Image (cartoon, helix red, strand yellow):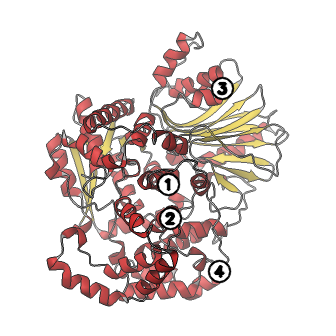
Amino acid sequence: MCGIAGLFRVGGGDASALTGIVTAMTATLAHRGPNADNVWTNDRAGIAFGHRRLAILDLTEAGAQPMRSDCGRFAVTFNGEIYNHLDIRKELEANNAAPNWRGHSDTETLLYAIRQWGISGALNRLIGMFAFAIWDDANRELTLCRDRFGEKPLFYGWIGRDLVFASELKALAGHPAWSPTLDRSALTSFMRYCYVPAPQTIWDGVRKLPSGSYVTFSANFDQQGMPEPLAWWSHKAIATAAANSRIQDDEAAIGELERLLLQAVQRQRLSDVPLGAFLSGGVDSSTVVALMQNSGSQPVRTFTIGFSEGEFDEASDARRVAEHLGTSHTELYVNAQTAMNVIPTLPRMYDEPFADSSQIPTHLVASLARQHVTVALSGDAGDELFGGYNRHVWGTKLNARLSGWSQPVRRLLGTALSAVAPEPANTIAQLLEPILPKSLQTRRAGDQVAKLARIVGATSLDDLYRLLCSIDSTPSDSVIAGNEAVSWADREMKTIGSPLDPLDRMTLADSLSYLTDDILQKVDRAAMSVSLETRVPFLDKNVVEFAARVPPSMKIRNGRGKWIVRQVLYKRVPATLIDRPKTGFSIPLDQWLRGPLKSWASDLLAPERLRRQGLFNAGRVELMLGEHMSGRRNYGYWLWNVLMAQAWHDEWCAG
């Protein structure tokens, strides 16, 4: 795991100048690679690669980067891990295509895989997480590549006559000619989702490379244009093909998932440095830890944090699972002040607006783990692959109900629900609470009625799911002169040729954007800010392809998601330790905004400040803030979006 940066200058450039620029860019990525810092240049070609190293495999100089092939044709700067690289070495050796290996790093394996099979041939053999740039001196081409699911980030764009790229946006600011313009359409999309979806970034003209794709620039490329990325792996193709090859037998499916997850965990334990795992006590992290404990000879180091607010505290659940499995467990209880101390660091940590509030506990647990290990496995992606979110359970039911109603009826119902005031709805819910089952109890009936009013008018399943995932369903009303652009995920969803089951369509939508642009981005920045590598066994290629073949009935059963994953876990952890309402990895945001964060929030959202900046509709913000502070409505997530955008603006645009 590392940080990479570089540039490709049209017409070549002075080696000293190129080195100076890329050195400044990589200096901003020191947290991603504290062990070494190197730059390689080819001034004739105008190429400069920078690398910050966090040594995980082959701690010697033989694993140093940027790395060149022995023939001199290829040079690479690589961030990530290739878990099956030893198998690839064996294949190279069997084909008499292996060099005299200098060391045992996966970067060296990658270089010679590309030399032997080309970019596409090599990429399709890789099982791992990565983002890298490779220079082909024979063809005079620079290629940027990203892994199947976007576990590792990669940004690129033009600065003057330099094509620049980096692991984080902040590295581009190290270029002396950096003078970006804010992209209001990206800000508008951010208000809907709490993240900027690929390929956009918050800066106009700077792109995220979509997951599972690569883009190539040749020596005669058009400086004014930008070649379109090519997909080397397709979520959409996997999902549509799998719909015709479903697994039918429960026991066979459970056994196969267990085998594949165990194989993934064993692959991802490959490390020359201390390794552990995050443990929340939920289904996914408990499954990963149970399989790690099963496949190793020493107790797994596990880490969790807890909050004093009982509704948000999972530490006791994690402790019980850890005790049952026999892990070496470390937990840390944090108070509101500890968590709030993280907030000022967030704009620089994420370097574009990002407002998934679980970024705070994720950073805290990563900081705790880094005191003991350099690598941590996590349970991320289980929800997206196996239908684990409440929206998967309720979205399929709601779609089935609404599909029989005409649009005029839906609009009429939406209008009627919109007229329901929040206080009466909340009062009725509280009065009914003693006689309702727990699954139907809520203290936020007014909020839920308002959300239902927005989504009943959905015109399609995709529209319904988009609204279910929206923090702001009308973001153009929030951002001044803001219009949403069509994201890469939106384009992919519109081109699905064969019909998919509603649940499959929802989880595919999650995999195309929410997983990559929210969950994986959140974990990457939170962990790499403290030089911790994270790994995700659920995103092993074979596990993902298997998940696509699992029928919806094995994902959601009896009103509960991730049925098949639970069956794997129950073999090692009793259901009594696992089965409880899903809470998510969150903070008491609504309460904090009315309490310890009130002064900070009021300052950032002051109407005169908003009008002066000219980004957000000050009247709308004032209305939402007032409603929230009075307790009439809970707009915590929406307000957090605006607050994170404001904090980001102060950090990156104020000067």
Circle 2/circle 3 CB separation < 8 Å: no
Query: Circle 4 — which element?
Result: loop
Location of residue 431 with respect to 584 vertically, above or below: below
Q: Which residue is mark 2?
A: 466
Residue 154 rendering spot, x and y as whole percentages: 60, 47
Cα distance in 3D space between marks 1 and 3: 30 Å
Location of residue 627 with respect to 651 vertically, above or below: below
Kindly indicate the quadrant of the structure image that contains residue 561: bottom left
Please give left or right for residue 547 compared with residue 17 in the image.
left
Sequence-wise first label, 4 or 3: 3
Query: Circle 2 — which element?
Result: helix
Cα distance in 3D space between marks 1 and 2: 9 Å
Amino acid type indicated by mark 2: Arg
- Residue 614 is tagged as 4
Q: Nearer the viewer, mark 4 or mark 3?
A: 3
Circle 4/circle 3 CB separation < 8 Å: no
Q: Nearer the viewer, mark 4 or mark 2?
A: 2
Amino acid type indicated by mark 3: Gly
Cα distance in 3D space between marks 4 and 3: 49 Å
Q: Which residue is mark 1?
A: 509
Packing grade of label 1 (10 A; few <14, some 14-19, many >=20) is many
Residue 539 rendering spot, x and y as whole percentages: 43, 41
Please give left or right for residue 425 compared with residue 466 in the image.
left
Location of residue 628 with respect to 647 vertically, above or below: below
